[in-house]
Image: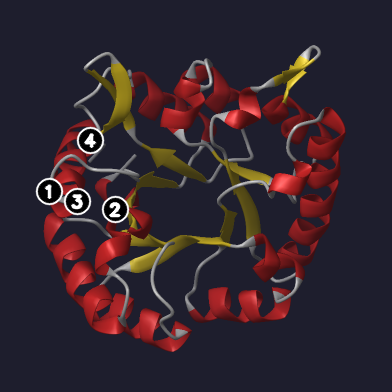
């Protein structure tokens, strides 16, 4: 990991990015912290060209997105055009639709459906990446949901965007999970887990209990391209949280 590979997930700043003015102000702060790129997710209904302009004006790449499943099933050509405009190769889905959850057959059906979408994206040199939560680690016999997604999806058309916090919350070692998706994870979500008042909570990178030197090394081992900092809920100003995480990750970065 190099510093220029560290990105900020705008979902962390969703309350500040509801309109173009807020987005621009937020991107200026993100750039000032030191980030080189952002993932577009959770922002307000801002025109794609305005998002592109705001990112360009602040010297930030758009490395990945999160879109709704309907953007992939009902508006795929529009979604492709937006990602091309943004020079963004990674089309992320933040969660499996509820209709596919709760059974091995549902996960298998989703793996097949998303793989077909991924094949269409590949024709445009774009890549589908799936972001997990905790529920994918529920077991269905000998396998959990993530096992099914990994084993029954197309290895080139269905990529992963592992979220380290949710992997840990699912009872799996993030380092092991990262190695399981070797060759299929160009983007990773980094967030730490702390225990406060006997409850687990989101924490800035380096402020919790997870082994991030080992996690970053595992990502290096499998060739991860983008290291995206996300914090769903912050106990302080979200910009300060992003700065704390960036400072810690910078200490692990290679020259």
Judge left or right: residue 192 versus residue 221: left
Q: Is residue 179 above or below residue 98?
A: above
Circle number at residue 4: 2
Which residue ends up furthest to the front in the rendered image?
197
> Label 3 to label 1, Cα distance in Å?
5 Å
Check if mark 4's residue and mark 3's residue have beta carbons within 8 Å.
no
Please report the residue visible at 78 percent of the width from the left and 37 percent of the height from the top: 107
Query: Disc 3 designates what residue?
Result: 238
> Label 1 to label 4, Cα distance in Å?
9 Å
Dividing the image into 4 quarters, which one contains the N terminus? top left
Q: Which of the marked residues, 1 or 4, is nearer the chain's N terminus?
A: 4
> Label 2 to label 4, Cα distance in Å?
19 Å
In the rendered image, residue 177, in percent from the top left (x then y), is placed at: 56, 23
Circle number at residue 204: 4
Check if mark 1's residue and mark 2's residue have beta carbons within 8 Å.
no
In the rendered image, residue 128, in percent from the top left (x then y), is placed at: 65, 55
Check if mark 3's residue and mark 1's residue have beta carbons within 8 Å.
yes
Q: Which of the marked residues, 1 or 2, is nearer the chain's N terminus?
A: 2
Tell which tag, 1 or 2, sits nearer the viewer.
Answer: 1
Query: Disc 1 designates what residue?
Result: 240
In the rendered image, residue 210, in percent from the top left (x then y), is placed at: 32, 19
How many neighbours does mark 1 have within 10 angstroms: few (below 14), some (14-19), or many (20 or more)? some
């Amino acid at each position: 990991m190099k510093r220029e590979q560290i990105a900020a997930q705008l979902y962390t700043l969703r309350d500040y990015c509801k309109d173009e003015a807020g987005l621009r102000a937020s991107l200026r702060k993100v750039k000032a912290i030191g980030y080189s790129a952002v993932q577009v997710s959770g922002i307000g209904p801002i025109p794609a060209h305005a998002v592109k302009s705001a990112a360009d004006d602040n010297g930030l790449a758009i490395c990945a997105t999160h879109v709704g499943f309907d953007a992939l099933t009902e508006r795929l050509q529009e979604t492709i055009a937006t990602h091309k405009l943004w020079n963004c190769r990674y089309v992320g889905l933040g969660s499996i639709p509820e209709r596919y959850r709760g059974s091995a057959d549902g996960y298998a059906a989703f793996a097949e459906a998303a793989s077909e979408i991924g094949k269409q994206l590949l024709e445009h040199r774009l890549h589908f990446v799936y972001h997990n939560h905790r529920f994918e680690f529920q077991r269905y016999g000998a396998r959990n949901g993530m096992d099914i997604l990994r084993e029954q999806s197309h290895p080139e058309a269905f990529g992963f965007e592992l979220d380290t916090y949710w992997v840990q919350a699912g009872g799996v070692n993030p380092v092991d999970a990262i190695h399981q998706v070797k060759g299929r994870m160009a983007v990773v979500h980094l967030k730490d887990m702390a225990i406060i008042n006997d409850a687990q909570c989101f924490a800035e990178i380096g402020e919790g209990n997870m082994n991030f030197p080992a996690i970053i090394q595992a990502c290096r081992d499998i060739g991860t391209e983008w290291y995206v900092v996300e914090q769903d809920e912050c106990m302080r100003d979200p910009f300060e949280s992003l700065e704390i995480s960036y400072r810690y990750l910078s200490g692990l970065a290679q020259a």
